[in-house]
Image (cartoon, helix red, strand yellow):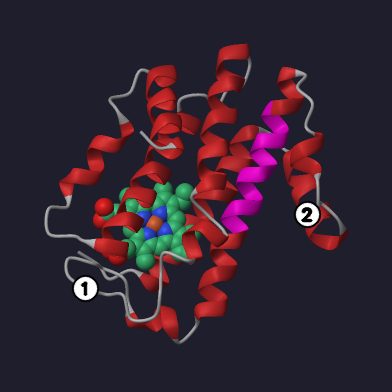
Amino acid sequence: MNKTLKLGAALGVALGLAAVSTSISAHDGATGVVKERMGSMANLGSAMKGIKANLQASTKEQNEGLLLAATMIMEHSGGNLNKLFPKGSTDAPSRALPSIWENKAQFDAISNRLNDASLALALNASKALGKDASGLREGLIGERGEIISSLSDQAVPVIFKTIAGTCGACHQTYRAPK
Ligand code: HEC
């Protein structure tokens, strides 16, 4: 079991969900990098459920659920997600649109925004749990650091909306409708 799946399973256990990794096998025809990114997206979907289930963020358990979900999104966004979209990887049953590679910088920027917003959630939950967040804060400088820091001070539902906004923005533009 790799680290991601372990984290996914831990999140599943923490939230009483079925094993997160099972949804990957739902795509029988997918292979290679297409299959891999569908797995990443499935993990993102599970993490969003994890946030939704803990939006109140009032108990320790809820904040731990949020921290796990945020960590999972951090791992499946930004550079880690961007590299799963090599040029022209649209083999069936992929719904990735070719326009991704006409605007790869913009595509990557949306994925990086998702990474930043999940970092804000991780900071928020760490603060609520009284955990040392210096590792998360490393490299948080300049305008980007300010945006992430101020988002982390918002209520969890606001951060959730920001995260969901990036999923929607990317899907609307770069994913073919079913
Ligand atoms: C930067 C762009 C981008 C972002 C950000 C993004 N997605 Fe996706 N997502 C895609 C693309 C493109 C596909 C289609 C991939 C394919 O079929 O090859 C996809 C597919 C999916 C799928 C279907 C996977 C499957 O098995 O077919 C799910 C579920 C999903 N995304 C969830 C999410 C969630 C939840 C978020 C936010 C937390 C998110 N995505 C953020 C681009 C993005």
- For the N terminus, the quadrant is top left
Residue found at x 36% / y 17%? 16
The amino acid on which the numbered mark 2 sits, given as a three-letter code, is Ile
Q: Quadrant of residue 157?
A: top right
The answer to whether residue 134 shows anywhere in this view is yes
35 over 99 or under it: above or below: above
Residue 72, position as x, y percentages in the image: 51, 39
Mark nearer the N terminus (2 vs 1): 1
Residue placed most toward the observer, 102 or 2: 2
> What separation in Å lies between label 2 and label 1 (alpha carbons)?
37 Å
Residue 20, position as x, y percentages in the image: 32, 33
In this rendering, would 127 be left or right of 56?
right
Q: Quadrant of residue 152?
A: top right
Overall secondary structure of the magenta stretch? helix
Residue found at x 38% / y 37%? 46
Residue contact between numbered discs 2 and 1, judged by CB atoms under 8 Å: no
Residue placed most toward the observer, 118 or 57: 118
In this rendering, would 116 be left or right of 45?
right
Residue placed most toward the observer, 152 or 88: 88
The amino acid on which the numbered mark 1 sits, given as a three-letter code, is Asp
Say if the magenta span includes residue 119: yes
Residue 91 is tagged as 1
Residue denoted by label 2: 147
Residue placed farthest to the right in the image? 142
The answer to whether residue 59 shows anywhere in this view is no
In this rendering, would 72 be left or right of 122?
left
Residue placed farthest to the bottom in the image? 102
Q: Residues within 10 Å of mark 1 (few under 14, many from 20)?
A: some
What residue span does the magenta drawing correspond to? 113-125
Residue found at x 56% / y 76%? 106
Where on the image, by quarter, is ligand 1?
bottom left
Residue placed most toward the observer, 94 or 160: 94
